[in-house]
Amino acid sequence: MAKIGPKFQCTNCKALHAKWSGRCDGCGEWNTVKEVGSDTGLANASSGGKLIELAGLKYGSGPPERSLLGIGEFDRVLGGGLVPAGTILVGGDPGIGKSTLLLQAAAAFAADGGTAVYISGEESRSQIGLRADRLGLSGAPVLLGTDTNISNILTTLDRQHPAVVVIDSIQTMWSEHVAGTPGSVAQVRAAAFELVRHAKQRGAAVFLVGHVTKEGQIAGPRVVEHMVDTVLYFEGDRGHHFRILRAVKNRYGPTNEVGVFEMTGKGLLGVENPSALFLSEREKPTPGSVVFAGIEGTRTLLVEIQALVAQSAFASPRRTVVGSDSSRMSMIIAVLESRCNLSFAGQDVYLNTGGGIRVTEPAADLAVAGALMSGLLNRSFPPSAVAFGEISLSGAIRSVAQTENRLREAAKLGFSKAMVPGGSKNLPVEGIDAKGLDDLPDLVNMFLDDTHQQSTG
């Protein structure tokens, strides 16, 4: 029987050829002859395939069923609780508290009657036991295992059928069917794929702990972030007692939702009113301090923006930013110099966000401008006022979303004044006097008038 060789077909006229040629004999076009069965789509790919069941858009409609972890701030970030068969990737700096938080979450879920398995590839059972004892969780019915072989882990999970699985961490897992050492791109991709497939087939919620690079991004191939349903970042300074859990991807809930935790001797405790906590250590009115009413996810947070402007001893003044966008601060300084006749030449500028939280919202522009102006002129901003608004290059102050929610949160914490964009809607809020500003010169004039009245009053 004669062997059937590869066939070639012209993508222009569909003429078949016994062998490849640069020019089609049928239509005369060049570079149109492709092999049938290549990735050009000319082959009949349905041979040997399995029929896929198709359904309408209403199939599976409605909100997914959820189960609570038992940690309020964690459930908030997830969108209201765990979704069965969901996969969650948790990243953060070393020592920030990822393992502690997930151990607490597994213990809280198991204590409420659920089944939770904690698999560690980085620590021994005795090390995890010591942490559990320190957190007061040694009696929690969590099933603990230590292994890095993905085949052994999947076999164990198939036997136990847990509702919640914690893998700490995905970079330590390896598959004997894939070449490469643990942590390599191929191994991380393969291990993540197997764990995601297990979650979808068995209906378990799987948490994957991920290492981060020095730039703060989750290490390994980006395809891992695409495979999972939710990506959470655990932020904060190890020298500070506040931690922020932020959702940057969530197929079952809002993105950019945040949960606030406080690191204590008994582990991480959720903070129900983070605004009051962020401002609890606020010092007496000093130059360079302005309170910003921001929005993080679905909640309103009040944080202190601090600026220090000092004479520089260098030819090139320093511009240092912690907790905000340095390029945006440079833009605001340029607008203040150009539109308000304020000079930062020869001045070192330091900008900091109180509480260790990172603020990236454009609505913080007005508070940053107020702090810089206050620090430059060495005059205190009104202590009972908050500020928010986006600044354009022309110096105009643009409206931002959820103005009323920001004002209500400020009024609840005892603030009586607010510097807001002039075009904002729904300004009347009981207990707070909102002053609309059209541009930055209005802020400068109001600030100078207020400080003058305070000095002569």
Image (spheres, rainbow, N blue to C red):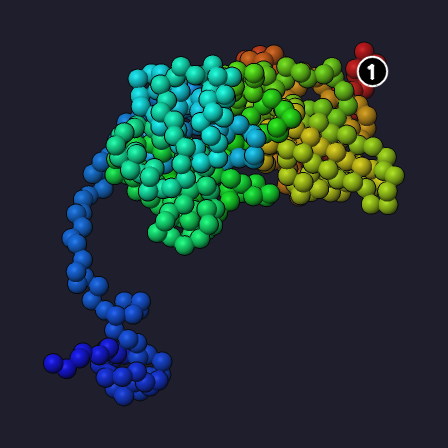
- Between 234 and 331, the one lying in front of the other is 234
- Counting the numbered discs, the total is 1
- Element carrying mark 1: helix
Q: What x and y, as percent, mark residue 141?
A: 35, 18
Task: Name the quarter where the C terminus is drawn.
Answer: top right
* Residue 384 position within the rendered picture, expressed as x and y whole percent measured from the top left: 67, 16
Q: Quadrant of the N terminus?
A: bottom left
Judge from the rendering whether residue 274 lies leftward or rightward of residue 345; answer left or right: left
Question: Taking 213 as reference, is 346 left or right?
Answer: right
**Crowd band around label 1 with a 10 angstrom C-alpha radius: few (<14), some (14–19), many (20+):** few
Q: Can you name the residue that lies furthest to the left here?
A: 1
The answer to which quarter of the image holds residue 411 is top right
Q: 413 or 168, which is in the foreground? A: 168
Residue linked to disc 1? 455
Q: Amino acid at mark 1?
A: Ser
Q: Residue at x 30, y 27 (%)?
A: 163
Looking at the image, which residue is at 71% across and 32% down? 351
The answer to whether 139 is drawn above or below residue 390 in the figure is above
Residue visible at 35% across and 51% down in the picture: 177
Residue in view at x 28 percent, y 75 percent: 35
Q: Is residue 115 visible?
A: yes
For residue 39, above or below residue 225: below
Q: Quadrant of residue 148?
A: top left
Residue 368, image x and y in percent?
68, 32
Taking depth in this image into account, of 408 and 274 the one nearest to the observer is 274
Give the x, y percent position of residue 93.
56, 35
Can you see residue 12? no
